[in-house]
């Protein structure tokens, strides 16, 4: 047996970490973020939980049983808990956006030519997945699970009253050889494979896109796609109401079955260079509101490529089926592909007219659309997003000091936050578990005892630079160790393990252990800083996402060789947070840390 399945079968299974070790590490993680009094209270609860023959051991045995019976003890639970049962809108709260480099075209012709080439490139990538010729990826020499690549095409999220579900039409008889194209809030079904099963080429796709464009010039259509931006329970009600009508149901099914969506956006109001990138990031996250492009989307679709008339382009993706790295690998492929010269022109076989998807809008559906518009516009007004390019250095400086660029940036974030608020906060950095079969992510907790020691010392004039450098290097070492611990094949981080124990208690119908009802647990899970690095991207892209708590920040960074792209989000409704302020403090922290390292002789540490 060769190929994808053999590779998948050969991957190690996600282990259940040792209980005592997780509890010790949990107390250590709490130390910098809760008061001594709270910590002592929690120590008592941990002692109770870890008693021999106690509840902790019982739940741990339940997890171990689950690990023996399933392919991955976590994946099903995580999908439900992190995504499908989450009731806030996917827009801003769950789905990331990616901004791609601005394209040179300035008109509709250029927009459609680029879109055609992009579609051809995405289909080229899909062929590698279909033929299982996609090279296996490695991280630190370990082969990674490739399953997420098989989940991103022809898939869609379906809203439900208590939890959503995901449909995947990529395999089997239900597979459909079309994509969805949206223009002026109007949806089209566009076949992208010829009768012999080969993908259409860019020239052919371009002609089809022109037909779509020319039959969707009216700008007064009801933005049916805006329904997908609503709170999941409201959308589930509206969805069931929408598909009662046979025509509507067929149109919705066509969107759900399509391989992916291409959104041909109207141009945005002109903006100066420094706010342009932030404006585009907002376009990718939410579409700018009901007056702009938010109706030109179907946010439940896993992949939506967005191309605007002014050359701005990117992607929005629904997070349930996949993490960022497979999406970035796809984007790298597509961006490289769009730079290639045109293929040989093939004989032009006349192609059939793309099918316009019809919707019958009842007064009730119109009312649902109005409510969704209002809620979305409030969300759009509330999101504060700032994209900045830090151009003083990139990965090159930390590497010259033999430091991990990731740890360097994370410590700069800790310093920036501490300078702003006078205290550290629970910090989430996502780390891959793809070295395990069906692995998703676990959490690197960047706020540590060591990072707190460093940020406290940094601005004290009575401390010697040498001491500060030693503390900084120690803090980065601790971060490095946590990172290595997550990716160790022993699966050693604490967050998913604690979640597993909690969900096991719910499944066993035992009363919830005190440990999970404790205020310290709530503090530990309240991530004021939710962060992620765009790993191994060849493309100068910016990924962005919203904060995960009302008073927090979403921070995404893509360290290139000589610069770093940052996207920082916050909510305007929180008076304490401000994306531009954090961006400024972060820049200062990065420069101060470089200066500290450069002005201090290398130590023996």
Image (cartoon, grey):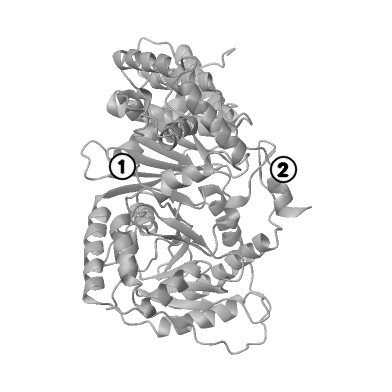
Name the image quarter holding the C terminus.
top right
Along the viewing direction, whichever of 455 and 362 lies nearer the viewer: 362
Judging depth in this view, the residue of 484 and 345 nearest the camera is 484
Estimate how packed mark 1 is, as few (under 14), some (14 to 19) or many (20 or more) residues with alpha carbons within 10 Å: some
Tell me the SS state at disc 2: loop
187 vs 98, nearest the viewer = 187
Residue located beneath label 1 in the image? 580
Residue 315 in the image: x percent, y percent?
46, 59
- Residue 10 badge: 2
Which numbered circle lies on residue 409?
none
Tell me the element at label 1.
Answer: helix
Please say if 604 is above or below 333: above
Q: In this view, does 307 lie above or below 509?
A: below
Task: Using the image, determine if residue 200 lies above or below residue 302.
Answer: below
Seen from the viewer's position, the closer of residues 329 and 129 is 129
Residue 153 location in percent, x, y? 55, 62
The answer to whether residue 293 shows anywhere in this view is no
Residue 376 vs 536, above or below: the answer is below
């Amino acid at each position: 047996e060769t190929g994808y399945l053999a590779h998948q079968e050969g991957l190690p299974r996600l282990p259940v970490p040792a209980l005592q070790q997780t509890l010790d590490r949990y107390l250590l993680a709490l130390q910098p973020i809760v008061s001594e009094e709270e910590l002592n209270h929690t120590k008592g609860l941990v002692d109770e939980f870890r008693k021999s023959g106690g509840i902790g051991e019982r739940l741990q045995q339940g997890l171990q049983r689950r690990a023996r019976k399933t392919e991955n003890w976590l994946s099903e639970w995580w999908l439900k808990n992190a995504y499908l049962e989450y009731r806030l809108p996917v827009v801003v709260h769950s789905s990331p956006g990616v901004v791609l480099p601005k394209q040179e075209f300035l008109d509709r012709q250029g927009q459609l030519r680029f879109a055609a080439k992009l579609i051809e490139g995405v289909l080229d990538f899909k062929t590698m997945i279909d033929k299982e010729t996609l090279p296996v990826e490695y991280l630190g020499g370990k082969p990674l699970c490739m399953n997420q690549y098989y989940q991103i095409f022809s898939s869609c999220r379906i809203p439900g009253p208590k939890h959503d579900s995901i449909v995947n039409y990529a395999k089997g008889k239900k597979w459909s050889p079309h994509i969805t194209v949206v223009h002026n809030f109007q949806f089209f079904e566009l076949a992208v494979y010829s009768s012999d099963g080969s993908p259409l080429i860019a020239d052919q796709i371009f002609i089809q896109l022109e037909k779509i464009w020319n039959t969707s010039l009216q700008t007064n259509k009801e933005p049916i796609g805006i329904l997908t931006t609503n709170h999941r329970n409201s959308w589930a009600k509206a969805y069931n109401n929408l598909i009662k009508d046979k025509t509507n149901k067929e149109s919705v099914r066509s969107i759900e079955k399509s391989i992916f969506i291409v959104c041909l956006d109207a141009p945005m109001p002109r903006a100066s260079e420094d706010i342009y990138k932030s404006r585009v990031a907002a376009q990718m996250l939410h579409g700018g509101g009901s007056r702009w492009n938010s109706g030109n989307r179907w946010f439940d679709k896993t992949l939506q490529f967005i191309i605007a008339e002014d050359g701005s382009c990117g992607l929005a993706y629904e997070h349930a089926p996949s993490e960022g790295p497979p999406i970035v690998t796809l984007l790298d492929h597509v961006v490289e592909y769009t730079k290639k010269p045109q293929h040989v022109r093939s004989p032009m076989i006349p192609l059939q007219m793309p099918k316009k998807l019809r919707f019958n809008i009842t007064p009730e559906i119109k009312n649902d659309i109005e409510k969704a518009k209002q809620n979305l516009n409030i969300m759009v007004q509330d999101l504060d997003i700032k994209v900045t390019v830090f151009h003083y250095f990139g990965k090159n400086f930390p590497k010259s000091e033999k430091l991990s660029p990731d740890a360097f940036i994370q410590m700069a974030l800790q310093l920036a936050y501490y300078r702003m608020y006078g205290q550290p906060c629970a910090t989430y950095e996502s780390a891959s578990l793809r070295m395990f079969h069906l692995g998703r992510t676990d959490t690197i907790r960047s706020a540590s005892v060591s990072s707190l020691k460093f940020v406290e010392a940094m601005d004290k004039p009575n401390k010697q630079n040498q001491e500060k450098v030693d503390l900084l290097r120690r803090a980065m070492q601790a971060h490095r160790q946590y990172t290595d611990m997550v990716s160790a094949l022993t699966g050693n981080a604490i967050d998913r393990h604690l979640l597993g124990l909690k969900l096991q208690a719910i499944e066993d119908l035992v009363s919830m252990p005190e440990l999970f009802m404790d205020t310290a647990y709530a503090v530990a899970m309240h991530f004021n800083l939710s962060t992620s690095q765009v790993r191994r991207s060849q493309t100068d892209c910016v990924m962005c996402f919203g904060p995960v708590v009302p008073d927090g920040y979403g921070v995404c960074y893509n360290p290139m060789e000589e610069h770093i792209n940052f996207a920082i989000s916050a909510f305007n409704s929180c008076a304490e947070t401000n994306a531009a302020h954090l961006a400024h403090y972060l820049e200062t922290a990065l420069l101060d840390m470089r200066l500290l390292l450069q002005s201090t002789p290398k130590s023996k540490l």
